[in-house]
Amino acid sequence: MNYKLTIKIVKDAAEFNKTCAEKIKEQIAKNPQSVLGLATGGTPVGVYKELVSMHKAGAVDFGGIKTFNLDEYYPIEKGNSQSYYTYMGENLFDHVNINKANTNIPSGEAKDPQAECDAYEEKITKAGGIDYQILGIGSNGHIGFNEPDDFFPDRTHFVDLNQKTIEDNARYFDSIDDVPKKAITMGIKTIMGAKKILLMATGAGKAGIIKEALFGNITPKVPASILQLHSDVTVVLDEAAAAEIKSSISNV
Ligand code: F6R
């Protein structure tokens, strides 16, 4: 099999944020009506900050952009400081000229989460699918909240968070007991349907899973490994996250 992933290693956080933001900027310049798939978590915070600066400098116009976030905790109120709804406002939407009506995040307040999943998937389909999907990766290999399992979940679905994910995300909450135990997430088929994907990872804590995901077997035990089958994925890593793949890369 020809190795299809494009891997870029950068030296520090500043270069990481700039490189990722530039790629998103290029996508928006190429298609000002792009449908972007967005991620939350620690990894993209600096990338969104960079995009906000680019926007303030007149270099990025979000006026025609539509967005779909990967996931949201369930249950969670939009106004909760840890909801992904709050995160997106604070980190991006409140600082750029995006039309809020064109931003979509699964609702953690939905009475019927399954109906919410179905409606979300339908909205993505109606928008013509995702043009450019931004992804982080969990230390257990998850993308979105597609957790390690015996199968690849396909469409947007309601999921029990993996214990590792709950532990990893406890750093954002007062206590681990406050971390929601469930979430709504785009599925693997939804993500793989994106025309282009940008996978981002930083820090030594991701080095092992990056090696498994990019160079290990394609298996639902490491959900991100499915990205090896996509035809247009760029992976941006800092030195620490790339520490275990240096020798594999020279063979690509
Ligand atoms: C967030 C998401 C998750 C994160 C992943 C990494 O919307 O879908 O898959 O990208 O958990 O999180 P950080 O960046 O906090 O290490």
Image (tube, rainbow, N blue to C red):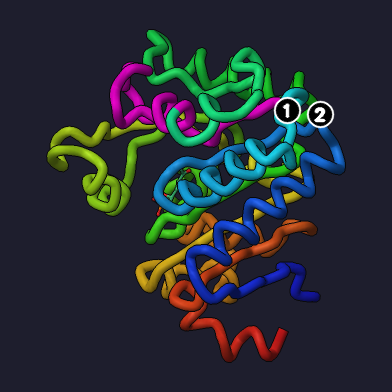
**Which residue is found at the position 55% from the left and 27% from the top?**
93
- Point 40% across, 34% down: residue: 159
Amino acid found under the numbered disc labelled 1:
Ile
Looking at the figure, which quarter contains the N terminus? bottom right
User: For disc 1, does the CB lie below 8 Å from ligand 1?
Assistant: no
Q: Residue 65 carries which label?
A: 1
Q: Confirm whether residue 24 shows in the render.
A: yes
> In the image, residue 51 lies at what x, y percent?
61, 44
Q: Are marks 1 and 2 in contact (CB under 8 Å)?
A: yes
What residue do we see at 61% from left, 86% from top?
248
User: Compared with residue 116, is residue 157 higher up or lower down, i.e. above or below?
Assistant: below
State whether residue 96 is above or below residue 53. Answer: above
C-alpha gap between disc 1 and disc 2: 5 Å
Q: Nearer the viewer, residue 30 or 134?
A: 30
Residue 158 is at least partly visible in this image: no
Number of the label disc, if any, that sits on residue 27: none
Other residues around mark 2 within 10 Å, as few (<14) / some (14–19) / many (≥20): some
Q: Where is residue 130 in the image (x, y as percent from the top left)?
A: 72, 35
Residue 221, image x, y percentages: 46, 59
Q: Does the magenta stretch include residue 70?
A: yes
Name the residue tied to disc 2. Answer: 33
Task: Give me the residue at 50% from left, 71% from top.
Answer: 12
Name the image quarter holding residue 33: top right
Q: How many labels does the image show?
A: 2
Q: Nearer the viewer, residue 103 or 183?
A: 103
Q: Is residue 48 left or right of residue 65?
A: left
Q: Write the start and end of the magenta stretch as one range.
A: 65-89
Q: Where is residue 66 in the image (x, y as percent from the top left)?
A: 70, 25
